[in-house]
Image (cartoon, rainbow, N blue to C red):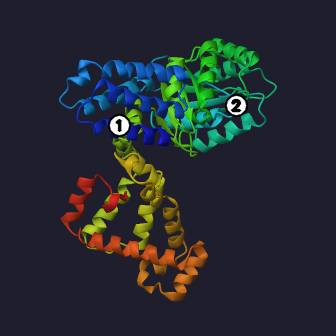
Amino acid sequence: MFDNLTDRLSKSIQKIRGQANLSEDNIKEALREVRVALLEADVALPVVKSFIDDVRERALGTEVLTSLKPAQVLVKVVQEELVKVLGEETTGINFNAQPPVVVLMAGLQGAGKTTTTGKLAKYLKERENKKVMVVSADVYRPAAIEQLQTVAEQVGVEWFPSSVIDDPVSIGMTALQAAKKGYYDVLIVDTAGRLAVDDAMMKEIKSLQNSISPTETLFVVDAMTGQDAANTAKAFSDALDLTGVVLTKVDGDARGGAALSVKTITGKPIKFQGVGEKMEALEPFHPDRIASSILGMGDVLSLVEEVERKVDKKEAEKLAKKVAKGNKFTLEDFQSQLLQMQNMGGMASMMDKLPGMSNLPDMVKDQVNDKSTGRMLAVINSMTLKEKKYPQLIKGSRKRRIANGSGTTIQDVSKLLKQYNQMQKMMRKFKGKGMMKMMQKLGGKMPGGMPF
């Protein structure tokens, strides 16, 4: 989401780092570039002005100018002020209330409330170990209730039935009683959206909020709406007692302005961000990590957490023992590693979290794309079991058959076999205790950055 902003800010920061001494003039020049970068990212003008003023005040003070490494201190100041704009602390759902904790989802139509309701339900069930019920109070959008039912079944949480002939307030109150009787930890209420903010919509959701007294009222906003997100956030914040914000479609081609504007305008923390279409693609919003990522410093902590959560440790240990014994690394093992990488969002997603990646030339970035992983998996899937076990059999006519079956070229098949052979050679070096030592050092990642 922050690609353009990261590129611009990284270039500005590089110029600052290149200065032997910082003066009022070159600080002003650097801040001018930062200001342009923020405006181009669609950050609301009042937010930009406040941010630049705060950075300038600190940058021209003794904290920076009298430092032995003023350029580095100035970068630190910019990062700290970004953290302030984004919210400083990571805050999740408040469970300090008598169950069921009620979470009310609010926002415009198309912001992704229903999908986010499902993602949040899955998150709370799997990562917080909560018993969750969901209900739809959207009696206007066609098939909204059925959509939530499908989503609830998909993520394995309880769906409370509602009908388009019911009143949203009565739906909320009936669902709350059912959640109490069923001893549920959390009740998530999906509400109706509109194509634009209107009085009738606000009155209805305010009545619903008053009747069920939610612990959390989350404003769901599409990160790709940019400047408009700030205006919508203001309208919802004025009408409702919001407790937090959920940014959706963060993985889209957005300029990032919504994230940098919404917190300041609502005064409420961004609690979660939707980072993909899959139901597991909801992550806590970490202001410090996001700020580091925007400045091209990477987000290694999130990468480590993702590896911990998504890597199949049993499979990793199984492969480690196999290779340690000197057994052959097969194409099936290679396929398993590619699937693990894909499960983590692909190589591009992993690289985004590593420091300095924003400074790589575009030509290098373009070569690291997840289409190649998909192609390699397609090639392996087109092989017979015998071919996976004995890749040396794959010559001329077999290559042609595999290429046709996978929708690739003979060159793609040859390229995959070459990469597999390189990986196999590398694995031979880790026989015995060497493999286990490597596993400990890499924390469960394959040589060359390929995860187990």
Which of the 4 image quarters holds residue 18? top left
Image coords of residue 438 (percent x, y): 24, 59
Identify the residue at image location x=50%, y=72%. 380
Q: Amino acid at mark 1?
A: Ile
Q: Secondary structure at mark 2?
A: loop
Q: Toward the viewer: 273 or 393? A: 273
Would you place residue 434 above or below residue 62 in this image? Answer: below
Indicate left or right for 146 with 294 as reference: right
Indicate left or right for 444 with 154 as reference: left
Q: Which residue is mark 2?
A: 109
Q: Amino acid at mark 2?
A: Gln
Which of the 4 image quarters holds residue 138? top right
Q: Toward the viewer: 50 or 26? A: 26
Image coords of residue 109 (percent x, y): 70, 31
Farthest-out residue, front: 25
Q: Which residue is mark 1?
A: 13
Residue 185 visible (yes or no): no
Residue neighbourhood size for the residue with mark 1, other residues' Cα within 10 Å, grouped as few (<14), some (14–19), many (≥20): many
Image coords of residue 412 (percent x, y): 50, 74
Q: Toward the viewer: 278 or 15? A: 15
Q: Are marks 2 and 1 in contact (CB under 8 Å)?
A: no
Q: Earlier in the sequence, mark 2 or mark 1?
A: 1
Q: Secondary structure at mark 1?
A: helix
Indicate left or right for 99 with 450 as reference: right
Would you place residue 67 above or below residue 363 in this image? Answer: above
Work out how far the residue at label 2 is from the one at label 1, CA to CA, in angstroms. 39 Å
Q: Quadrant of the C terminus?
A: bottom left
Identify the residue at image location x=52%, y=25%. 261
Would you place residue 37 above or below residue 311 in this image? Answer: above
